[in-house]
């Protein structure tokens, strides 16, 4: 059997982190077994579907590295199959029209609650014969329901879950779900299950909030003699407040994270370890993650997303990037310079940045005229004009002997040491109080680069003394 999984979003909004986990786990399962991962848009909600969301979801999946097999599929392409499935269910007595108004349903729920019963549908319209149902359908609004509920105590639906084992649902505890609304549009339950059968989906990985949906779908597929996928219901993904990550609650979109400059693999690294402790703590590529992924090890407990963990992975990945790739990322945050020089700078500052925009703090290494912030100017003025006068003279004097000789002689002649020696030099050369080691900075700037920045620092201290 070819393992075939799918990601089936509704194109009614942007891809968010809750969606990413569903897509990632299905992608990993298919990739691990050399199978197929299908992208299928559940696009039957004409009022809310938008082409821009179809394009955006596809773009975000590609950016994350989650490529799919073949062309994207669309649920509306199976519309005839959905109607045919409904017709077969109705003819066999497994689906029926329900004419109950919203007001009547509310009364029934209150009545059930007063008797200490679950607020299920009463099954009133199940008793209608076919002739009466068809006659009323000509003039009354109605929905279609599945006839799942049974009062027989031995009637069950069993979901065979690869994480939880066999889950047995008593049909007396299950409602008769609506599968077609009064406007003629299908709800999630029937088209999703029929499409899985038509697309040859062998495994469905999704959150445990779908367990009841799965029971309905297993029953539906069994009535139609269609194949039932293997299911894996993992624990839900929660936000920092402990609520389910969802579009409705404003979950962070992938587009927002991309705009913030996060590395896509940082999202993957943070996501794949949630509820899956078997993956080691190394920086891995997607192929290596596939090798370590064990679907049977997924936790059934809820997992909580952490932006902090994602950014920690981003920092690790950023620092591990080849210098040319990092150069491309930091370029928008720095003054223009030659590509070779930018790549050299990227290699120099990689251990000192957590995000691409942090490179802006090192602009003075590219452009000696980069203005200093108030903290940096204070450091230079506290060092004073004599310190930089001496530093310039000694720099000119040491010639090719290099930075270590220069710093040793400056320490001896100025009487400064430790922070009082290195901090003003660092600020003068780089514009910031933190960064690479001084010897590397001096090598990067070269003789004239160091001299220019020392002269600029001297002018700054002179201005401070005049004021």
Image (cartoon, rainbow, N blue to C red):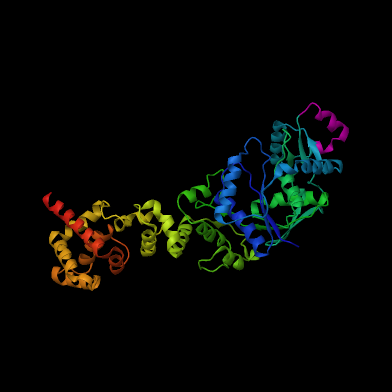
Q: Residue at x 84, y 43 (%)?
A: 88
Residue 399 point in image, percent of width and height = 20, 70
In this view, the residue in front, 369 or 379, is: 369
Residue placed furthest toward the top = 139
Q: Main secondary structure of the magenta part?
A: helix
Q: Does residue 327 appear in the picture of this structure?
A: yes
Q: Which residue is drawn at 75% across and 30% down?
A: 141
Q: Residue 126 lies in magenta, yes or no?
A: yes
In this view, the residue in front, 339 or 432, is: 339
Q: Give the range drawn in magenta.
A: 125-140
In this view, the residue in front, 397 or 374, is: 397
The answer to whether 421 appears left or right of 355 in the picture is left
Image quarter (top left, top right, bottom left or bottom right) of the N terminus: bottom right
Residue 254 point in image, percent of width and height = 53, 50
The answer to whether 137 appears left or right of 72 in the picture is right
Q: Which residue is drawn at 59% across and 44% down?
A: 55
Q: Does residue 252 appear in the picture of this structure?
A: no
Indicate whether 315 appears above or below 248.
below
Residue 157 point in image, percent of width and height = 78, 53
Q: Name the image quarter holding residue 351.
A: bottom left
Residue 460 point in image, percent of width and height = 18, 54
Q: Name the image quarter holding residue 122.
A: top right
Q: Residue at x 67, y 42 (%)?
A: 43
How many numbered marks does the figure carry?
0
Q: Residue 302 lies in magenta, yes or no?
A: no
């Amino acid at each position: 059997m070819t393992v075939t999984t799918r990601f089936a979003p509704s194109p009614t909004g942007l891809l968010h982190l809750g969606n990413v986990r569903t897509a990632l786990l299905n992608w990993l399962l298919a990739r691990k077994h050399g199978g197929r991962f299908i992208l299928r848009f559940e696009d039957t909600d004409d009022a809310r579907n938008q082409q821009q969301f179809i394009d955006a979801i596809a773009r975000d999946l590609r950016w994350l590295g989650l490529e799919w097999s073949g062309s994207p599929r669309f649920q509306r392409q199976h519309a005839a199959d959905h109607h045919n499935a409904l017709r077969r269910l109705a003819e066999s007595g497994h689906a029926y029209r329900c004419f109950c108004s919203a007001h009547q349903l509310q009364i029934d729920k209150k009545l059930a609650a007063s008797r200490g019963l679950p607020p299920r549908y009463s099954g009133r319209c199940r008793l209608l014969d076919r002739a009466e149902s068809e006659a009323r359908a000509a003039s009354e609004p109605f929905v279609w329901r599945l006839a799942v509920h049974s009062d027989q105590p031995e009637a069950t639906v069993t979901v065979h879950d690869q994480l939880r084992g066999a889950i047995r649902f008593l049909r007396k505890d299950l409602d008769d779900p609506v599968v077609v609304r009064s406007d003629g549009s299908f709800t999630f339950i029937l088209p999703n299950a029929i499409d899985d059968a038509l697309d040859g989906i062998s495994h469905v990985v999704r959150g445990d909030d779908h367990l009841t949906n799965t029971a309905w779908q297993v029953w539906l597929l069994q009535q139609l003699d269609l194949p039932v996928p293997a299911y894996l219901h993992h624990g839900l993904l929660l936000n920092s407040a402990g609520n389910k990550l969802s579009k409705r609650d404003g979950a962070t979109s992938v587009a927002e994270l991309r705009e913030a400059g996060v590395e896509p693999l940082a999202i993957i690294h943070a996501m794949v370890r949630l509820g899956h402790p078997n993956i080691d703590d190394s920086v891995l590529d997607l192929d290596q993650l596939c090798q370590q992924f064990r679907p049977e090890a997924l936790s059934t407990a809820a997992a909580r997303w952490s932006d902090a963990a994602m950014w920690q992975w981003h920092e690790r990945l950023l620092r591990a990037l080849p210098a040319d790739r990092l150069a491309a990322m930091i370029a928008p945050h720095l003054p223009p310079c030659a590509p070779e020089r930018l790549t050299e700078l990227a290699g120099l500052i990689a251990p000192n940045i957590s995000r691409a925009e942090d490179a802006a703090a090192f602009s003075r290494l590219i452009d000696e005229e980069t203005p200093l912030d108030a903290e940096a100017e204070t450091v230079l003025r506290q060092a004073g004009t004599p310190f930089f006068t001496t530093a310039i003279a000694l720099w000119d004097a040491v010639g090719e002997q290099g930075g270590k000789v220069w710093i040793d002689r400056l320490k001896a002649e100025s009487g400064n040491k430790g922070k009082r020696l290195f901090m003003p030099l660092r600020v003068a050369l780089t514009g910031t109080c933190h960064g690479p080691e001084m010897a590397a900075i001096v090598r990067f700037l070269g003789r004239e680069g160091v001299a220019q920045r020392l002269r600029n620092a001297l002018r700054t201290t002179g201005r401070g003394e005049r004021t």
